[in-house]
Image (spheres, helix red, strand yellow):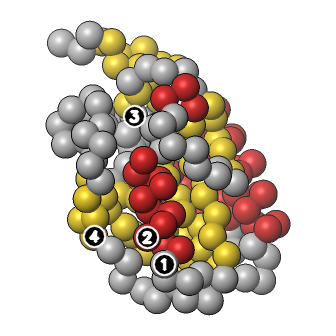
Amino acid sequence: MDKLKIVITKEVIAQRIDELAAEIRRDYKDKNPILIGVLKGSFVFLSDLVRAMNIPVEVDFIRVSSYGACKETSGKIKLVQGLKIPIKGRHVLVVEDIVDGGLTVSFLLDYVKRRKPASLKLCTLFDKPSRRKVEVPIDYRGFTIPDAFVVGYGLDYSEQYRYLPDLCVLEE
């Protein structure tokens, strides 16, 4: 059985989301931004962030695959679900659960840029810079975390553990 160790509690996560929301609310005042959630992992963060922002926004989702049921990315990014709403000329904020190697986020940002938004920024709740293979611009960062396999708060391992309210290290 897998052993879980809490590294960031739900209370600390909630406080940081409130702080991020305040920054984003200030930067996007009167802009009616489109927030693009990266499925599946970002859905918990995105829903909490949108409520904490408390300003008019539109939401869309994009889904990519690079992990499968493994702990290591395959390095091959596949677009599973593209955007449904037009973003040309709009202010866009991509909302990601975790930036790890940067390959997936780089792919996503290129995909969004090709649709010619007025502006494009990236918000991630968790950042693991020690694993970076491709540098990506992070405009809003919740936490910098060490190189460990983490689950909870929307992050999974083989579709398990998303329900956990805290960020946990999965120890074997």
- Say the numbered circle drawn on residue 152: 3
* Sequence-first disc among 3 and 2: 2
Task: Give the foreground label among 3 and 4.
Answer: 4
Question: Residue 38's image quarter?
Answer: bottom left
Residue behind mark 2: 111
Count residues near mark 4 (Cα–Cα under 10 Å), then give few for <14, some for 14-19, many for 20+. Answer: few
Residue at x-position 66% and y-position 45%: 141
Count residues near mark 3 (Cα–Cα under 10 Å), then give few for <14, some for 14-19, many for 20+. Answer: many
Residue behind mark 4: 81
> On the rendered image, what quadrant is the C terminus found in?
top left
Q: Residue furthest right?
A: 26
Residue behind mark 1: 114
Q: Secondary structure at mark 4?
A: strand
Residue at x-position 25% and y-position 40%: 74
Label 3 and label 1: CA atoms lie apart by: 32 Å
Looking at the picture, how far across and down is residue 52, in whole percent? Answer: 65, 59
Label 2 and label 1: CA atoms lie apart by: 6 Å
Amino acid under label 4?
Gln
Depth check: give the residue in front, 12 or 170.
170
Amino acid under label 1?
Arg
Depth check: give the residue in front, 72 or 171.
72
Height in image: 29 above or below 157? below
Are the residues at dot 2 and dot 1 in contact (C-beta closer than 8 Å)? yes
